Image (cartoon, rainbow, N blue to C red):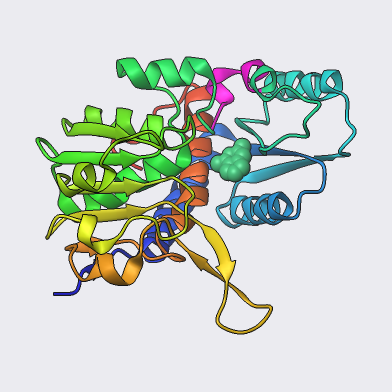
Amino acid sequence: MTAAVIDGKAFAATLRARIADLAAAFELQAGRKAGLAVVLVGEDPASQVYVRSKGKSTIEAGMASFEHKLPADTAEADLLALVDRLNADPAVDGILVQLPLPRHIDEQKVIAAINPDKDVDGFHVTNAGRLAVGQPGFVPCTPLGCLMLLKDRLGDLSGLDAVVIGRSNIVGKPMAQLLIGESCTVTVAHSRTRNLADVVRRADIVVAAVGRPEMVKGDWIKPGATVIDVGINRVPGAAEGKTRLVGDVDYASAAAVASAITPVPGGVGPMTIAVLLRNALVAAWRNAGLELPADAI
Ligand code: GUN
């Protein structure tokens, strides 16, 4: 048996089209575009690519994009002052400060300065707390995208055994909270977990978010399980000087056992920006005091 391929790229494109419709409806009702501000400090090449891509997707969705590029030696106080201005700006519904920040800036302090109702990354402790207790807030984009793919594939997740590999604040922990919210039985595994293969073998749902290339092997997967691979790892390619992208899951061996699996690239990756736009649009409707059509996105 070969697993069905979960096409995150196609799902994300459908989601972006729905967002564009709702962004147009928002503009009609609010008399302004929904706005997303993205702040980049320094010149990290990967971050520059992400920020450019976020800006382009925001405009394509019919929303306003505000890009703030600051030099790598920007003082923490100046970044905090910019966040304050964006908090106060009524044209800005969502604020994203691209991570990682240069070492002289305290990331937690910057995240704490963002108005939680504009925190479309869902990184503020207020939003982490809201997620934990089941109140409406913002959920980090990557795990929310993973949940959308899982629900699209499996429907009701209630009672399923889920294993999340990785315990980061950005993916692992919020993923576990979301799956608890769907009434899964959730295990969070990490670098100190004993007998990881045996733990993973119990799972109907495996979410791998460890950042270790092809660590999860096919013989760790329960036959028929659904596998979500969050990893994006660059490894040496077949040809000299070339690289290729692989996930945290050994795709070929896992696809022989699983019932469905996300590829890398083209699985979880494209979902992250689509969910960011979704969060920004939800922020806009809420911040404008308007009613978002029920179950719209
Ligand atoms: N760096 C890598 N991924 C992300 C993300 O989702 N949000 C932010 N703010 N920075 C990132």
Residue closer to the observer: 98 or 280: 98
Asked if one can make out residue 35 in the rendered structure from this viewpoint, the answer is no
Residue plotted at (22% across, 32% down): 186
Quarter of the figure with residue 220: bottom left
| Placement of 65 over or under 107, stated as above or below | below
Q: Is residue 151 above or below residue 80?
A: below
- Residue 235 on the magenta segment: no
Instruction: State the image coordinates of residue 28 (x, y, percent, origin top left).
Output: 53, 41
Residue 194 vertical placement versus 58 (above, below): above
Furthest-bottom residue in view? 239
| Of the pair 2 and 124, the residue shown nearer to us | 2
Q: Give residue 247's position: percent from left, percent from top.
A: 44, 60
Please provide the residue range marked out in magenta. Answer: 111-120
Image quadrant holding the C terminus, namely top left
Where is residue 46? Give x, y as percent. 69, 54
Residue 204 screen position, x and y as percent: 15, 48
Q: Residue at x 53, y 59 (%)?
A: 233
**Most common SS among magenta residues:** helix
Residue occupying image coordinates x 21% and y 41%:
199
In the image, what residue occupies the spot 57% across and 63% down? 234
- The quadrant in which residue 219 appears is bottom left
Ligand 1's quadrant is: top right
Q: Quadrant of the N terminus?
A: bottom left
Residue 241 visible? The answer is yes
What residue occupies the far left of the structure in this picture? Answer: 159
Q: Residue 116 magenta-drawn?
A: yes
